[in-house]
Image: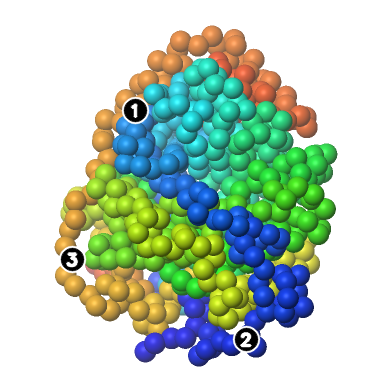
Amino acid sequence: MTDRPIRVVLAKLGLDGHDRGIRVVARVLRDAGMEVIYTGLWQTARHVARAVADEDADTVGISLLSGAHLTLVPDLIDALRAEGVGHVPVVIGGIVPDGDVPVLEKMGVARVLGPGTTLERIVGSFRELAAASRAGQRR
Amino acid sequence: MATFDTISGREIKPFYTAGDLPNPNGSDGAPGVPGVPGAFPFTRGIHADMYRGRLWTMRQFAGFGSAEDTNQRFRFLLDKGQTGLSVAFDMPTLMGLDSDDPRARGEVGRLGVAIDCAADMQRLFDSIDLARVSTSMTINAPAPILMAFYLVAAERQGIAWDKLGGTLQNDTLKEFHAQNEFVFPPEPSVRLAVDVIEFCARHAPRWHPVSISGYHIREAGSTAGQELAFTLIDGIEYVERALQRGLKIDDFAPRLSFFFNAHNEFFEEIAKFRAARRIWARRMRDHYGAKNEASWRLRFHAQTAGCSLQAQQPGVNLIRVAYQAMAAVLGGCQSLHTNSMDETLSLPTEESVTLALRTQQVLAHETGVTSTADPLGGSYYVEALTDELEKEAETYFARIAEMGGVVRCVESGYFRREIASAAARYQREVESRKRVIVGVNDFIEPPQPIPTHKADPSVEPGQIERLRTLKAQRDPAKVAAALDRIRASAAGSQNLMPAFIDAARLEVTVGEMMSALADVLGRYKQTAGWW
């Protein structure tokens, strides 16, 4: 499995339909050579966790602009563990108030990328996290 | 390096002359003369006296928490001099789910107000006279049901439906293109929208039963030309469907209304509004044979561009909003929402929403832009842009017709792909700093946090509790009968509004009615071609 392209699952969690950002991110990650599985809108935590397991993803990116992150992200972390993919790093994008970032990190979120994050930094973050996750898996 | 194309990618010349004036032999008037405001084709505005006669309606979109919370915000805004109300519903309501639905977890009352039933709607407008205030409701897939709640709330205030003024967004087509709050497949979605148009034409003649919206299309990343074209072609689709029902054009066209984005590109935005009026007037008169001048006039609400707001240096957003609002006014809007500076971070605070409203009041009372109609009429540049946008829209109309029409293009994902390509192009331009965004990719400063609105965690459990109590107090046999009637009407071809209104009177909830509808109409799944 050396040099297998990075596989990323991207998902919209909950009812929020704001998908302009996540679709731009999907295109950019694809252009950067990653394999992107975008699950689409209105996903439940369990659906996303199953997609991460089924797709053998290196990382998972969640977009949330609904303000429901403190309810839905813990559900996701639990669901990933239940699917046996609790080690896959979770990236959150969208609107997260500054004060909530450490709360999410404590829950196990690897990175929160807020508004204004450059596409370059987004690509870099997914690369680093995938590499770290693979290295962790090999150990 | 400076760029000389618009944010929509339109190339701009160093200067414009009389040679750029459109329609040398067009119906606007003499060569190069754009006609007068208040006369066909209304390029220069729908009234001759424009804002001298009446200012636009200052209408701030508001809603959060429980019906009481939002009622309080409404009264605060009316006290501050706002002239119309605009309801923001929470995500579960927008998706037609009750507050106690497991899928609603964490989202009840968060991005808008939670409304489950007619009693909630009644509390939302407590002590607000529905005969005097004009109310706009941003709701789409469940729009007919929320309209039924509003009609029942009015009934309970003792107000006749023909006294009600306001607007129901009820534009399900753009949900498929951009806003993503669709529930049913495209065909039944359009049918439901037309049910409201038909019902209001007969029973609530002062109400605008649809607000054909480009706002969300633009927010999703479209160009100005796409926003214009996709909105108007959606409008034409509703017109066609209403005519197929046997309605006469002049029975409903005067109550159609539109909703556009007011984005950063100042002159192109003004030209977009002017082009919209001209295209619509010509269609209504020349193609549909409308005789009533009111049918020719395109009326629109504008909202400044939410997607142009930045989280960095939020105070700068005040300046963006002010310019965008001026473009909307110079473009001849009938009502306007100005975004608050903190809306990239959370729902707005009372302070920031007051500043947003004050921005409109300064425009209206201090700048003098309201003193004459269409002050930019005759500008070589603006007239040339107006003409270019009109041509661009006509090109899109032809392409959409070739591909089988609006519903086919929804199903094939055409609209979504067009919009997504424009959004990706724009983002790359920002990334490469071809486009400078103040505070984001230039003129950067360290973050300075500002106070933001905090959601009240007791809202969700409170709303769920109230809903459970309400459900327990109803007569289950009557509720079941009301839902059966909805299913039966949906299976046939009757207008569904009477069944929704009767159910609303019994406090049947939005979630119950939507799920009865889904039993018959099905739910729409996104298809692969959509990305």
For the point 26% across and 36% down, the residue is: B456
Query: Which label sits on residue A124?
Result: none
Specify which label sits upstream in the sequence, 3 or 1: 1
Q: Position of residue A19 (x, y in %)?
A: 46, 58
CB atoms of marks 3 and 2 within 8 Å: no
Determine the CA span between mark 3 and mark 2.
48 Å
Q: Is residue B446 above or below residue B214?
A: below
- Same chain under badges 3 and 1? The reply is yes
> Mark 1 or 2, which is nearer the eye?
2
Which residue carries the number 2 mark?
B18
Q: Which of B236 and A56 is in front in this view?
A: B236
Q: In which quarter of the image is the N terminus of chain B?
A: bottom left
Q: Position of residue B464 (x, y in %)?
A: 37, 25
Going by the numbered disc 2, the residue's amino acid type is Ala
Q: Nearer the viewer, residue B66 or B279?
A: B279
Which residue carries the number 1 mark?
B68
Q: Where is residue B314 in the image (x, y as percent from the top left)?
A: 26, 62
Q: In this view, does B23 lie above or below B60?
A: below
Going by the numbered disc 1, the residue's amino acid type is Glu
Q: In which quarter of the image is the C terminus of chain B?
A: bottom right
Q: Which chain letter matches label 2?
A: B
Q: Can residue A78 be seen in this view?
A: no
Going by the numbered disc 3, the residue's amino acid type is Pro
